[in-house]
Amino acid sequence: MTNSVDHYHEQLQALLPVGPAWPREMNTVLSNLLFAIAEEFARVDFRVDNLLEEIDPRTASELLPDWETAFGLPDKCTDAAVTTVERRLALHEKVARVGGASPQYFIDVAARLGHVVTITENVPSAHHWQVNGPLDTIKSFESGGSTAGDPLRSWGNDVIECVISRIKPAHTIVHFAYT
């Protein structure tokens, strides 16, 4: 906690007027009342610190469902995102997506979804291109990122195929190659 109960108690006592009606000793009725108020201030302060984690979709836990609702998730591409980490990655990718058609743009989209890919452009036909990646992307349980109920490991590339197929330029054909 940024500010402890004792720190808030001291601050509250400092705001009291001077005089015999305002005792500063411990275990008085006034001191106990100030401790109760200080506990609430410290609790609120702690929750505000937690809120700072919730405003970033990459670290949100309590507000993750609200973030997903605001950005229309889960959708048909992210139904497979079942772990907390995968849900955060899908959300972050959608929040950070600005659009583009360059190979680097699609590499960045894949990276935000937790995949490492390369793009091969077919020179004779500018309308065909290929996404190259590993056969199965293995995602492991992350301490501090995953939550109870998440699998220890998951495999697959369904999300990346769906997302790239959805956001690719309409006049192009994308193929997926796995090694």
Image (tube, rainbow, N blue to C red):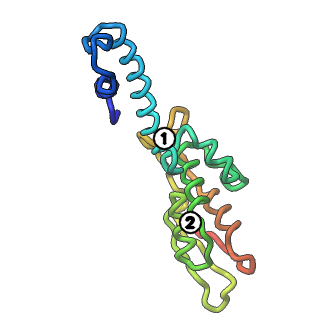
* Mark 2 → mark 1, Cα distance in angstroms: 27 Å
Q: Is residue 169 left or right of residue 61?
A: right
Q: Residue at x 39, y 28 (%)?
A: 42
Residue 18, placed above or below residue 112: above
For label 2, count other residues whose C-alpha is less than 10 Å away and answer few (under 14), some (14-19) or many (20+): many
Q: Quadrant of residue 28?
A: top left
Residue 3 percent location from the top left of the image: 33, 32
Q: Which residue is situated farthest in the left direction here?
A: 25
Q: Which residue is situated farthest in the bottom direction here?
A: 124
Query: Circle 2 sits on which residue?
Result: 109
Mark 2, secondary structure of its residue? helix
Query: Circle 1 sits on which residue?
Result: 51
Q: Amino acid at mark 2?
A: Val
Q: Residue at x 42, y 28 (%)?
A: 41
Residue 99 percent location from the top left of the image: 62, 72
For label 1, count other residues whose C-alpha is less than 10 Å away and answer few (under 14), some (14-19) or many (20+): some
Quadrant (top left/top right/bottom left/bottom right) for the N terminus: top left
